[in-house]
Amino acid sequence: MKKRKLFIDALRGFALVNMILYHGLYDIVYIFHQNITWYQGKPGYLWQQSIAMTFIIVSGFTRHLSKKPVKDGITIFLWGFLLTLITTIFMPDHKILFGILSFLGLAILISWLFEKYLNRIEPIAGLFFSLFLFISTKEIQRGSLFFDKIHLPQEIYEIPGLFVLGFPDIHFSSTDYFPVFPWIFLFTAGYYLGKMYKKKKITLPNIPKKEDILTFIGQNSLKVYLLHQPILYLLLTGIFTVLKNYR
């Protein structure tokens, strides 16, 4: 996997374009107070989940491309922490506590720390086991495991700081929240897909044939992610100011 694969870059770019659109609508609905029924309902939720899942799987897949996982993990985590500081200070009603960047940075570090154990598992077994654990812990934030068969003690959700692991207390709120559990299992699913690709057990679609706008965005995803929300906010502020003046 020494050479970048355009399909992975394009897939990440496609997810990022969707994220930009999703965040643009978020600003319109929750900051500029416009009603978009489908966005606030299940279709919007499913859209958001599909974007996040794509990002996390691709990040796990490309973990094998990283020559300096510790540096990469710390860098991404610190950017996530900076977003937490900025949103907490300037946008407390829309603050981000342990969002996607914080999670991805920590997931990279966790995969590095436990890499020798992850590599002892056959990739196909690791893939299916990871997916099973992800689905089984998907409702951990709401207090249950294994398809609502096991209910966790409420006391766990009263311990400060455990929101990082997936145990938020009743007062916790964040506009972007991806705790370690269940999302680490989706990351390891991507990790094992990457292992399967390295061992030539799976192939990637040979698309696109050459670099395009999606691959460019995918290759510069961190920069685009960090810049898109301030640009969206300024753009939408200008648009709604003009609209208000013409009413």
Image (tube, helix red, strand yellow):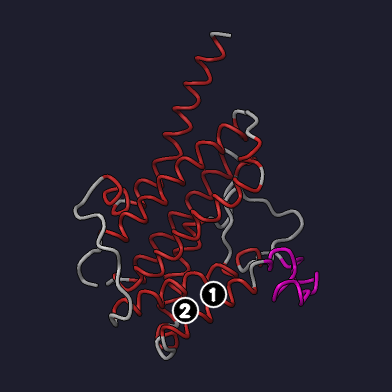
> How many angstroms separate mark 2 from mark 1 (CA)?
6 Å
Which of the numbered marks, if any, corresponds to residue 189? none
Task: Report the residue marked by disc 2.
Answer: 127
Quarter of the image with the N terminus in it: bottom left
Task: Report the residue marked by disc 1.
Answer: 131
Q: Nearer the viewer, residue 158 or 35?
A: 35
Instruction: Tell me residue 146's x, y (percent).
Output: 69, 76
| Amino acid type at mark 2 | Leu
For label 1, the crowd category at 10 Å Cα-Cα, with few meaning under 14, some 14 to 19 and many 20 or more, is: some
Q: Residue at x 39, y 87 (%)?
A: 119
- Magenta residues span 139-159
SS class, disc 1: helix
Instruction: Tell me residue 89's x, y (percent).
Output: 57, 42
State if disc 1 and disc 2 touch (CB < 8 Å): yes
| Amino acid type at mark 1 | Leu
Q: Residue at x 47, y 83 (%)?
A: 126
Instruction: Tell me residue 12's x, y (percent).
Output: 37, 55
Based on the picture, tell me whether residue 220 belongs to the magenta stretch.
no
Based on the picture, tell me whether residue 145 belongs to the magenta stretch.
yes
Left or right of 111 in this view: 131:
right
Q: Quadrant of residue 91?
A: top right
Q: Is residue 14 above or below residue 235?
A: below
Q: How many marks?
A: 2
Left or right of 229 in this view: 11:
left
Instruction: Tell me residue 114's x, y (percent).
Output: 45, 83
